[in-house]
Image (tube, rainbow, N blue to C red):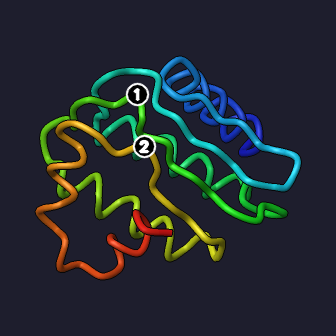
Amino acid sequence: MFAARNSRRSVKAFESWSDRFCLVVCEGGTLHVRPLAATLEAAELRVLLDCITLTGFTEGLTEIVFDLSGVSMLGPNSTLIWAMILNFARQAHRPCRLAGLRAQPAAAASMYRRNRELMNLIAA
């Protein structure tokens, strides 16, 4: 019974982010995570990261790339978005990096230029 309930919850989580994010695993084992909307919301990112973490999806991956090239704006609490990405990068035990920063997300990230961990994700 627990497995069925957990399975339904997983399906709901998948449905909630599958139309908001594109996930592609390349031949070399790199996972590319690309938001499909112009605005990245913290709540949506949390569901996606939780789903990736809980399913063990990172097993066998060599790198995880958050491609924000299609994102022109971060939702409220951009600090929370950066914190979630940093926390995920720490727990993934895989190299993670941020790519395609432009517009408001780039400006928001530059506010944290003294945060060495975040800057390493951008520079990687």
Percent position of residue 107, x then y = 15, 49
Looking at the figure, which quarter contains the N terminus?
top right
Three-letter residue code for mark 1: Gly
- Furthest residue in direction top, as rendered: 19
Judge whether 112 appears above or below 58 on screen: below
SS for callout 2? loop
Q: CA distance from mark 1 to mark 2?
A: 8 Å
In the image, residue 65 sits, relative to residue 3, either above or below, namely below
Residue at x 43% of width, y 68% of height: 123
Q: Which sits in the foreground, 9 or 68?
A: 68
Task: Name the residue beneath numbered marker 2.
Answer: 100
Q: What residue is at 38 percent from the left and 35 percent from the top?
A: 44
Query: What secondary structure is marked by label 1?
Result: loop
Q: Is residue 20 above or below residue 2?
A: above
Tag 2: Cα neighbours inside 10 Å, few (<14), some, or many (≥20)?
A: some
Asked whether disc 1 touches disc 2, contact meaning CB atoms under 8 Å apart, the reply is yes
Q: Which numbered dot is residue 70?
A: 1
Most foreground residue, 68 or 7: 68
